[in-house]
Image (cartoon, rainbow, N blue to C red):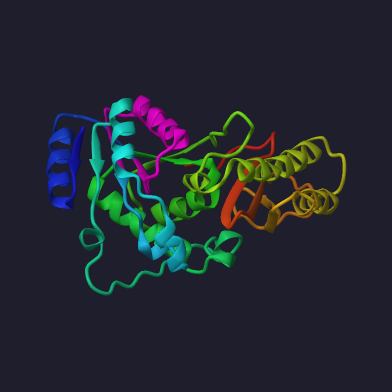
């Protein structure tokens, strides 16, 4: 595996690969890799000739400096995992390589950046789109894969790609869960075993909502209220939001609507760690890339 720390060196290498007719795939990460990341990379390997992974803890998407400072950075372990799965290129830049001086960034994301996660993390998705645009410019990928767990992130990146008319194909890959159903996340390393058990309330509430919506057992408002009760009654779980939304707009949906595919989304705190998760409701189609 080749490791590059500068955009110029990375670009020169990938230009050579493109000249040889190679198809380039990209998975953007902030490190602390887990099986969910590896699943994205394995999926991308099947669709490309050269797999590029970027590891960059992006400061502009953290509205909480303590959260940024606490973010895990086990780089040696990450490199080992990438080598094990046969990653071709690791892009590992410093902050100074990606940002120079004061930069302004504010694009119209159709309100996708101000709801759900955006409401609790102001500016987060502007920071996400800013760094992903930089990474797309540096790598020039033919395909880029993202995990469903960060569904709203996928939606804003999709919007950013549309705005700049970038020639990249986006792929949304299923959430990878552990044997108990907990969505894999880099933040899970900060949970104790007991905390991981408590966190299962998130997937339990999502599954409850998914089952009841799909089988039309109750109104959406009743289903949402019961799912929130599941979370509130769970030991050690502090719920931030639980919503039933349109997959395309991520706006709340109050009743079955023709042509609208649904997703249920949740955010909650466990042992001081903020966790998010979601489930697509059976019967709808994922957003087109």
Residue at x 12%, y 44% (from the top left corner): 12
Residue at x 47%, y 67% (from the top left corner): 64
> Which stretch appears magenta?
27-53
Residue 221 relative to residue 6: left or right: right
Q: In this view, does 181 lie above or below 240?
A: above
Q: Can residue 108 be seen from the camera position used here?
A: no
User: Where, by quadrant of the figure, is residue 197 drawn?
Assistant: top right
Q: Position of residue 154 (x, y in %)?
A: 48, 48
Q: Position of residue 153 (x, y in %)?
A: 49, 52
Residue 259 relative to residue 174: left or right: right
Q: Where is residue 45 in the image (x, y as percent from the top left)?
A: 34, 28
Residue at x 86%, y 48% (from the top left corner): 219
| Residue 202 vs residue 111, the one in the foreground | 202
Residue 31 highlighted magenta (yes or no): yes
Residue 165 relative to residue 108: left or right: left
Residue at x 23%, y 73% (from the top left corner): 101
Residue 149 relative to residue 166: left or right: right
Q: Can residue 133 be seen from the camera position used here?
A: yes
Q: Where is residue 79 in the image (x, y as percent from the top left)?
A: 28, 37
Residue 42 highlighted magenta (yes or no): yes
Q: In which quarter of the image is the N terminus?
A: top left
Count of marks placed on residues:
0
């Amino acid at each position: 595996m080749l490791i590059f720390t500068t955009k110029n060196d990375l670009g020169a290498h990938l230009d050579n690969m493109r000249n040889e007719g190679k198809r380039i795939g990209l998975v953007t990460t902030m490190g602390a890799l887990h099986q969910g990341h590896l699943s994205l990379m394995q999926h991308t390997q099947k669709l490309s000739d050269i797999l590029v992974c970027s590891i960059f803890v992006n400061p502009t998407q953290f509205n909480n400096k303590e959260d940024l400072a606490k973010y895990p950075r086990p780089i040696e372990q990450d490199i080992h995992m990438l080598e094990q799965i046969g990653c071709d290129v690791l892009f590992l830049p410093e902050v100074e390589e990606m940002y120079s001086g004061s930069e302004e960034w504010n694009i119209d994301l159709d309100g996708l950046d101000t709801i759900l996660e955006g409401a609790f993390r102001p500016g987060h998705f502007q920071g996400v789109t800013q760094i992903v645009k930089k990474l797309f410019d540096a790598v020039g990928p033919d395909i880029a894969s993202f995990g469903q767990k960060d569904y709203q992130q996928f939606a804003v990146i999709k919007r950013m790609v549309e705005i700049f008319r970038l020639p990249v194909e986006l792929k949304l890959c299923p959430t990878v869960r552990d044997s108990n159903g907990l969505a894999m996340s880099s933040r899970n390393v900060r949970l104790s075993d007991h905390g991981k058990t408590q966190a299962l309330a998130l997937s339990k509430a999502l599954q409850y909502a998914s089952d009841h919506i799909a089988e039309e057992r109750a109104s959406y408002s009743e289903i949402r209220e019961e799912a929130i009760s599941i979370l509130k009654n769970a030991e050690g779980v502090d719920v931030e939001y639980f919503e039933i939304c349109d997959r395309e707009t991520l706006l709340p949906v109050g009743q079955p609507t023709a042509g609208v595919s649904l997703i249920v989304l949740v955010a909650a705190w466990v042992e001081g760690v903020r966790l998010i998760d979601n489930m697509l409701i059976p019967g709808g189609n994922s957003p087109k890339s």
